[in-house]
């Protein structure tokens, strides 16, 4: 194994978020409210299978053990199952996850698992079908719920469900969500709304801190779970009376970035140090031949030497990210 990817703050990077498309078929208010529009009005080519393989191979050589395949909506790629299989086949990769809106899960989640998918996150922003439609722009609630049931049926031990907290929209649904996970192996993850370049008004009107939920959980006997080496930033709570778990992702909380262990590569082959960074570094020219692996690793590590200690969201600076779909959330 080459030297472990690390930065100047002694953070080690075990986790790669790899976007394979920025196309999405949902129109979520906090991400793509007007639907997907190609950058500069034209579709550009996304990473090919061999480029994905070389990317993951380089990261695996430097200590990465978990890869999350993201989008946009990654399952829109016709070769999505092949992507899973390719990622899972890389030596050193022990966790292959994806984040999906869930609309194709019922039909395809069994083949994804067979191909090597070990973990799955599904976006569900409301358990009220009408509110689900209002937030996502799609009347797909029943299909998504059926997909979650199917994932558990085919052998996933747990499904993680991502819910973006939106004041005055889904913020009153905590009791409904808690009832839902009481008997189901679901880790429900409440994610604070994050400011990006195209949604200042939405953020101002609907941002809600996760602190009130955390206080409610602690007051009702929920306990903080220990964090694993390749886990994401969620604070996870467990309760003896619940099969499910609750995770809180609160990027505005002090010291949020101290435990950063993940890097991002966009669907067009750019390395991003942070979801809210000011630039991406092109890797694609080094993804064309196997012989370029050492040079690729060196370019990634050089950028890590310049990685900032944290984001600048508290200063109102959200970086260059126009919306979460653009580099995989």
Image (spheres, rainbow, N blue to C red):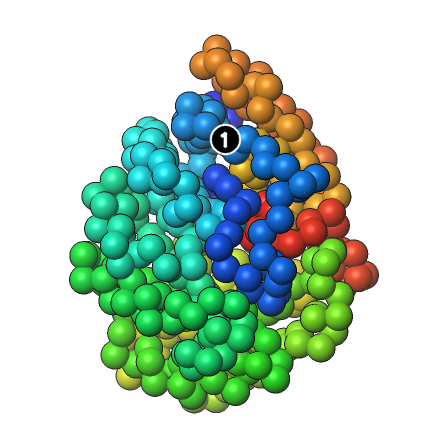
The x and y percentages for residue 275 are 63, 49
Check the image and report above or below for 73 versus 30.
above
Can residue 226 be seen in the rendering of this structure?
Answer: no
Q: Which residue is mark 1?
A: 47
Check the image and report above or below for 300 versus 144.
above
Q: Is residue 321 left or right of residue 72?
A: right
The x and y percentages for residue 134 are 53, 75
In the image, 16 versus 327, the foreground residue is 327
Where is residue 67, by image quadrant? top left
Q: Residue furthest right?
A: 315
Q: Residue furthest top?
A: 291
Check the image and report above or below for 8 versus 107.
above
Which residue lies at the image location 68% right of the left edge and 36% below the top edge?
Answer: 280
The x and y percentages for residue 159 are 32, 62
State which quarter of the image contains the N terminus. Answer: top left
The x and y percentages for residue 329 are 56, 53
Can residue 274 be seen in the rendering of this structure?
Answer: yes
């Amino acid at each position: 194994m080459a030297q472990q990817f690390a930065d100047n703050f002694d953070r080690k990077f075990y986790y790669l978020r790899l976007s394979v498309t920025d196309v999405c078929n949902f129109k979520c208010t906090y991400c793509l409210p007007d639907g997907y529009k190609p950058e500069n009005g034209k579709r550009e080519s996304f990473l090919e299978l061999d480029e994905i393989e070389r990317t993951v191979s380089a990261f695996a050589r430097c200590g990465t053990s978990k890869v999350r395949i993201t989008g946009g909506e990654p399952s829109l790629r016709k070769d999505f199952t092949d992507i899973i299989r390719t990622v899972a086949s890389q030596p050193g990769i022990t966790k292959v996850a994806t984040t999906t809106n869930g609309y194709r899960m019922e039909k395809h989640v069994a083949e994804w698992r067979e191909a090597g998918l070990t973990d799955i996150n599904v976006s569900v922003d409301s358990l009220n079908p009408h509110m689900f439609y209002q937030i996502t722009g799609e009347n797909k609630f029943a299909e998504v719920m059926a997909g979650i049931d199917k994932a558990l049926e085919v052998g996933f031990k747990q499904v993680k469900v991502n819910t973006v907290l939106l004041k005055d929209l889904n913020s009153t649904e905590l009791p409904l969500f808690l009832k839902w996970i009481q008997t189901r192996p679901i880790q429900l993850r409440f994610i604070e709304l994050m400011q990006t370049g195209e949604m200042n008004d939405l953020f101002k009107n609907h941002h809600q801190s996760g602190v009130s939920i955390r206080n409610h959980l602690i007051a009702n006997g929920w306990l903080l779970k220990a964090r694993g080496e390749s886990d994401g930033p969620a604070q996870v709570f467990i309760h003896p009376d619940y099969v499910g778990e609750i995770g809180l992702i609160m990027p505005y909380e002090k010291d949020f970035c101290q435990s950063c262990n993940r890097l991002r590569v966009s669907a067009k082959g750019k390395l991003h140090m942070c979801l809210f960074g000011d630039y991406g570094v092109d890797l694609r020219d080094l993804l064309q031949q196997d012989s370029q692996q050492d040079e690729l690793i060196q370019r990634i590590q050089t950028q890590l030497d310049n990685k900032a200690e944290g984001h600048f969201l508290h200063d109102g600076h959200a970086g260059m990210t126009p919306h979460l779909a653009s580099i995989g959330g």
